[in-house]
Amino acid sequence: MNHILKMTIKTLAGITPAEAVAATKYESSRQLRDRIKALARKALGEGPALLKLQALVNTCETLTEKRNDLVHGLWAKELDGDAHIRDAHGNERPLPTIPELKVLANEIDVHTRHLNSERLDGFLSEALRKRNNA
């Protein structure tokens, strides 16, 4: 997902893939999303394309938070109890099942592909083309 966020920055800024990767080398997912929102407002102006892109980026945030809760959570098993995971907010829940992990991985994959499709030949590509031709 972060790679496609970087490529979205590339598309909005009109730079090469290598330049986008180099410019965002140490940026977190949040920083990438924030940069996209700022660039999109400048490149697209107010309107449906901006709102659609913001919605896609906000869904990226939700999925990243779900991933981070698992990757960065505390996985533990009580000596006389069940295994659980504690997220950054201190919430505990049972360990996810393999099917639950597969569902999350699929959601991330499907959303990443959707964002990339919109960037390459969907509403984002069309909006930028119209704006550049105006």
Image: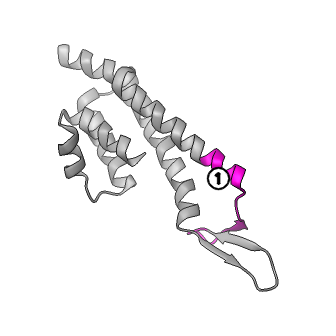
Which residue is found at the position 18% from the left and 37% from the top?
16
Q: Amino acid at mark 1?
A: Leu
Q: Position of residue 86 (x, y in %)?
A: 64, 71
Left or right: 36 as drawn, with respect to 20: right
Which residue is found at the position 46% from the left and 33% from the top?
113
Residue positioned most to the bottom: 79
Q: Considering the image in quadrants, where does the N terminus appear?
A: top left
User: Would you place residue 41 above or below residue 103 in this image?
Assistant: above
Image color mode: one colour
Decide: few, some or many residues near mark 1? Use Cα within 10 Å; few <14, some 14-19, many ≥20: some
Which residue is found at the position 75% from the left and 82% from the top?
78
Magenta-drawn segment: 87-104
Which residue is found at the position 18% from the left and 13% from the top?
133
Q: Report the front residue among 29 and 95.
A: 95
Q: Position of residue 22 (x, y in %)?
A: 20, 51
Residue 47 visible from this viewpoint: no
Q: Quarter-wise, where is residue 54 in the image?
A: top left
User: Would you place residue 27 above or below residue 40 in this image?
Assistant: below
Q: Position of residue 134 (x, y in %)?
A: 19, 13
Residue 48 visible from this viewpoint: yes
Left or right: 16 as drawn, with respect to 72: left
Query: Could you tell me which secondary element the residue under label 1 belongs to?
Result: helix
Q: Position of residue 105 (x, y in %)?
A: 58, 47
Based on the picture, tell me whether residue 9 belongs to the magenta stretch: no
Q: Quarter-wise, where is residue 118 in the image?
A: top left
Q: Quarter-wise, where is residue 13 in the image?
A: top left
Q: Exactly how many numbered labels are in the figure?
A: 1
Q: Report the front residue among 51 and 126.
A: 126
Residue at label 1? 101
